[in-house]
Image (tube, coloured by chain):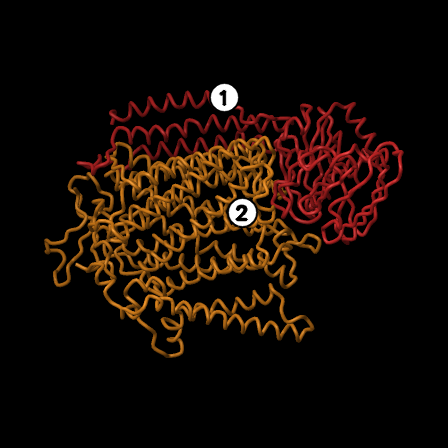
Chain colours: A red, B orange
């Protein structure tokens, strides 16, 4: 017995020490930007500390058995007739039960209510409605709606009230480590406090990602998230509610374009305007009950990368006609799309 | 001594294509009945002022007629149904006896086992090909190899075909072939039901392929509504396929339970049952009782699509979460249906190839039964982020953590068996040891998902993808290959090539681990599941995963070469090349039609290696002798 027991024990202890050091050092969650997220990241690390000796024990048995007692040819004798009817199974059941109960209690049952605690009086309320295939984000108290990015003030309690208009979606901001499904007919919530500032461009984990398969453009259903100081947040709220996106009235010769959305396609895939003109773009949404918009981006990659649109209309269900006026950007080729249907409704916008 | 020549020599030596005649007849019968059903639907529709043909409704009603038509045509009439009307049915020995018996209705459990095994190995490789396509798409963060829609369909097909393989490959293949032999019986309790279970499978494959012509479906294999009620018509084909497949699973579960309870050889007490048979017994209890919920969920989807019933539409008083409860009520026990037979094979191989008794035999049995007992009360751990009532979270966290205890008992048995064993490192043993390693990782990572706080971030991310591939491939598929190499000589009468087997194992083990370990990392870094595009920061990781996955795919080449070559030209195998004690090794390779020359009489334990004075496991009395006094053919003695 000691022939294998001693090396196995040594191996177990060595592997456990190495494993626990790795578990302590490993950067499991490089981005943790919420208060509850920090608790979750800690819980993960603690579970890892518990998992290491279990894992290394099995490895020690496997390795010591195969290294000490194996061969490629038929063994000349049988092994010892150990039936396992004595104390070993009892001790095993005892230890595994204690581990299971311990892990159940902490981090399990103790952290659970903390993570699900709902903020009844949050500093910021954000209403999020998932639709195939974008998020409609509005701030009821701040009177902001149709936001194309989620902007939050750092160190303030935020509560997201989440629902869906059509199929199941799931609200996930990886940097915050919290997720809950968006269910039609229900309102689910996530309450948290962002603890660091950041932008999606700097850290892709700071995005609102749909994480429940919702059809065609599920993988593209994301919005950039930005955590800013209170002052920057207030300024952003001001800019959003103070009129339609687009800034000051553009000067220059007028260029009127009408584009129609019907059967989830645009009727034109290329729009051309002269440089320096004041573009007056009308989106004629003829799809009854289906929301569309028209958004202009620097390029396809910029749109996918979460940049804000250069110009555009709000997301609204048809039948509706929307008009937006903006100054034509510098000469070049740009990209437009419907933010709700980013796979099938896209086109090129040429300024020459 | 019966040998394989007896089985290959008969038959009228007719042209090879005659093997397909029963199948062609069955297909024609199926389509004829389908037309009757669709025709009836057309009449009723027209009478109510609708157009005659509606794809989904005509399909559903037509299929309800067509499936029995196919079954009658393929053998249910000739071998079973004629009797109901007072006619004479064909007997067991009245079909072809040569290679053509594999292509039609056979009631020999060994033939059915081979039919299942070959069918599902082919499906496994097909779904594996889809996985390769998935990994091609994911080489770039925004890739246009496949459109988003096509990718969703490929991913959904990969999922459901692999689920089918997971359900039926080990149970249908090895359960069918070896449970009767290992308990010393001539066949299963219900041979005709057994054939029926197998012939329910081809319509499933046909439906899933035909679904692609109807637009496929993009809701994964989980098919959550409301998406699955609104998407393309392929979803209706999917629902019908699942209901059919579920029926096959339920019937085979029933068959195994009755077989194991009633057809054990004299002296085969429950305490002398091989652990693989215990695992099959436990699994069959789950298949028999839970599969109905899978079919119910699918039926509700179909009815909501086709007949306007409301189950899941919130705007009309339904509840999307209802589906998830019904679906996971089956689909969690289903994962134990996947893995338990594989763990049974693993423990078998570990004991025979360590030349040691199975350690803590009754504790292992208790572990298997404990797993199935708990499996029915943990389902909502798939729904922690679903928005269900918060008071459900704690109980399901507790019950899910508890499952680790009986699972640990299976590990106790495995580790105690190899501890100080004399390990014979042949290919089956390599795969069995691989199972212990892989399933360990799968099981441990499950703890992070069972814990609600950590699950909230990991749910629906690549962490989960890695976890279930570790448990299913690492646990079940590695065990499937352990069983293939272990039982290849018994089933085919030839020995596989050991070198190719070792190459297959190492390529597969390294490729598998290198593919799926990084996926845990991807999940932690914000990569969610079922996506055709991802954020650019994850490209390096995904390229590495894809390359390793291609390696994993390539590892099956030596396997296929080995199988084809060894079946044709491999050296003849002895009755007991592994010198193992269980009953299947006490008869010829391959076994005669009735499995043994005479029913064995069991007098010892199957795993008594190294036990001084242990009696032989069983004696096979030769016809004409009294059994007890006869000195000949004492089988399975100690070394």
Is residue B33 shown above or below B498? below
Are discs 2 and 1 located on one and the same chain?
A: no
Is there any visible trace of residue B300 in the rendered image? Answer: no
Relative placement, left or right, of B242 versus A85 is: right
Residue drawn at point x = 34 percent, y = 74 percent: B89
Q: Which of marks 2 and 1 is in front?
A: 2
Relative placement, left or right, of A319 versus A225 is: right
Q: Where is residue B148 in the image (x, y as percent from the top left)?
A: 61, 46
Is there any visible trace of residue B435 in the rendered image? Answer: yes
Residue receiving disc 2: B155
Quarter of the image containing the C terminus of chain A? top right
**Chain under numbered label 2:** B
Quarter of the image containing the N terminus of chain A? top left
* Circles 2, 1 touching at the beta carbon (< 8 Å): no
Q: Is mark 2 on a helix, strand or loop?
A: helix
Q: What element carries label 1?
A: helix
Q: Position of residue B170 (x, y in %)?
A: 38, 50
In this view, the residue in front, B563 or A332, is A332
Is residue B610 shown above or below B5? above
Q: Which mark is residue A24?
A: 1
In this view, the residue in front, A88 or B611, is B611
* Figure quadrant of residue A190: top right
Is residue B367 shown above or below B323? above
**Chain under numbered label 1:** A
* Figure quadrant of residue A12: top left
Q: Where is residue A254 in the image (x, y as percent from the top left)?
A: 88, 40
Question: Local crowd at mark 1 within 10 Å, few (<14), some, or many (≥20)?
Answer: few
């Amino acid at each position: 017995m000691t022939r294998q027991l001693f090396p196995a024990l040594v191996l177990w202890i060595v592997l456990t020490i190495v494993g626990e050091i790795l578990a302590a050092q490993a950067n499991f969650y490089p981005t943790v930007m919420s208060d509850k997220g920090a608790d979750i990241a800690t819980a993960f690390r603690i579970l890892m500390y518990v998992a290491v000796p279990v894992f290394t024990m099995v490895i020690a048995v496997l390795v010591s058995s195969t290294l000490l007692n194996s061969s490629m040819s038929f063994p000349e004798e049988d092994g010892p007739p150990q039936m396992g009817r004595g104390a070993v199974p009892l001790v095993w059941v005892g230890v595994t039960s204690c581990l299971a109960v311990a892990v159940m209690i902490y981090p399990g049952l103790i952290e659970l209510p903390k993570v699900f605690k709902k903020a009844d009086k949050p500093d910021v309320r954000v209403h999020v409605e998932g639709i195939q295939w974008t998020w409609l984000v509005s701030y009821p108290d701040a009177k902001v709606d149709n936001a194309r990015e989620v902007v939050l003030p750092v160190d303030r309690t935020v509560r997201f009230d989440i629902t869906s208009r059509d199929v199941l979606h799931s609200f996930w901001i990886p940097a915050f480590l919290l997720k809950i499904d968006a269910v039609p007919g229900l309102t689910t919530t996530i309450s948290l406090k962002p603890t660091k500032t950041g932008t999606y461009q700097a850290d892709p984990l700071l995005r609102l990602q749909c994480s429940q398969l919702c059809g065609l453009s599920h993988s593209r259903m994301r919005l950039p998230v930005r955590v800013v100081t209170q002052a920057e947040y207030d300024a952003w709220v001001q800019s959003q509610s103070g009129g339609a996106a687009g800034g000051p009235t553009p000067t220059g010769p007028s260029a009127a374009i009408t584009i129609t959305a019907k059967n989830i396609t645009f009727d034109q895939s290329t729009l051309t305007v002269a440089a320096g003109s004041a573009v007056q773009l009308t989106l004629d949404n003829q799809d009854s009950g289906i929301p569309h918009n028209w958004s202009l981006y620097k390029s396809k990659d910029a749109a996918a990368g979460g940049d804000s649109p250069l110009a555009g209309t709000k997301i609204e269900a048809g039948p509706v006609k929307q008009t937006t006026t903006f100054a034509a950007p510098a000469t070049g080729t740009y990209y437009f799309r419907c933010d709700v249907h980013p796979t099938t409704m896209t086109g090129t916008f040429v300024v020459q | 001594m019966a040998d394989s020549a007896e089985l290959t020599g008969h038959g009228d030596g007719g042209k090879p294509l005659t093997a397909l005649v029963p199948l062609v007849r069955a297909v024609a019968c199926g389509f004829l009945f389908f037309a009757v059903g669709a025709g009836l639907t057309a009449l009723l529709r027209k009478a109510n002022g609708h157009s005659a043909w509606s794809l989904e409704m005509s399909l559903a009603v037509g299929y309800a007629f067509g499936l029995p038509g196919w079954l009658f045509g393929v053998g249910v009439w000739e071998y079973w149904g004629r009797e109901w009307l007072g006619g004479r049915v064909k007997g067991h020995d009245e079909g072809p006896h040569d290679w053509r018996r594999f292509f039609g209705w056979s009631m020999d459990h060994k033939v059915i086992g081979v039919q299942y095994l070959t069918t599902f190995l082919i499906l496994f490789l097909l779904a594996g090909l889809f996985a390769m396509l998935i990994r091609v798409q994911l080489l770039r963060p925004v890739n246009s190899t496949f459109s988003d829609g096509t990718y969703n369909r490929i991913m959904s097909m990969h999922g459901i075909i692999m689920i089918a393989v997971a359900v039926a490959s080990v149970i249908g293949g090895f359960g069918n072939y070896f449970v009767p032999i290992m308990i010393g019986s001539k066949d299963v309790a219900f041979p005709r039901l057994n054939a029926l279970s197998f012939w329910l499978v081809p319509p499933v494959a046909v439906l899933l392929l035909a679904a692609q012509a109807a637009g496929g479906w993009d809701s994964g294999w989980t098919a959550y509504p409301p998406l699955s009620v609104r998407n393309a018509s392929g979803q209706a084909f999917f629902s019908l396929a699942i209901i059919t497949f579920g029926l096959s699973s339920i019937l085979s579960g029933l068959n195994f339970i009755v077989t194991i309870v009633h057809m054990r050889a004299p002296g085969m007490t429950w305490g002398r049952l091989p652990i693989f048979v215990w695992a099959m017994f436990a699994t069959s209890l789950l298949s028999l009782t839970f599969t109905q919920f899978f079919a119910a969920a699918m039926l509700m989807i179909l009815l909501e699509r086709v007949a306007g019933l409301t189950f899941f539409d919130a705007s009309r008083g339904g509840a999307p979460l209802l589906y998830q409860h019904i679906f996971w009520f089956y689909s969690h026990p289903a994962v134990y249906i996947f893995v338990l037979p594989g763990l049974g094979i693993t423990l078998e191989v570990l004991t025979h190839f360590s030349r040691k008794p199975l350690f803590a035999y009754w504790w292992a049995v208790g572990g298997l039964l404990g797993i199935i007992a708990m499996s029915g009360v943990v389902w909502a751990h798939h729904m922690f982020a679903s928005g269900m009532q918060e008071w459900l979270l704690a109980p399901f966290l507790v019950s899910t953590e508890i499952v680790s205890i009986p699972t640990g008992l299976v590990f106790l048995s495995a580790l105690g068996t190899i501890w100080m064993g004399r390990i014979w490192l042949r290919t089956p043993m390599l795969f069995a040891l691989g199972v212990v390693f892989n399933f360990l990782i799968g099981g441990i990572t499950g703890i992070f998902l069972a814990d609600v706080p950590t699950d909230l971030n990991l749910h629906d991310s690549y962490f989960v993808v890695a976890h279930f591939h570790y448990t299913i491939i690492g646990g079940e598929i590695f065990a499937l290959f352990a069983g293939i190499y272990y039982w290849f000589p018994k089933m085919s009468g030839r020995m596989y090539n050991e070198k190719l087997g070792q190459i297959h194992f190492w390529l597969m083990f390294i490729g598998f681990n290198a593919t799926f370990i990084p996926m845990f990392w991807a999940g932690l870094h914000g990569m969610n599941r079922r996506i055709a595009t991802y954020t650019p920061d994850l490209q390096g990781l995904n390229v590495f995963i894809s390359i390793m996955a291609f390696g994993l795919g390539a590892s099956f080449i030596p396997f296929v070469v080995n199988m084809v070559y060894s079946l044709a030209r491999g050296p003849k195998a002895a009755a007991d090349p592994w010198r193992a004690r269980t009953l299947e090794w006490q008869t010829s390779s391959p076994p005669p039609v009735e499995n043994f020359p005479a029913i064995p009489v069991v007098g010892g334990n199957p795993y008594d290696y190294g036990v001084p004075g242990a009696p032989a496991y069983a004696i096979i009395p030769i016809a004409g002798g009294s059994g007890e006094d006869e000195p000949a053919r004492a089988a399975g003695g100690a070394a």
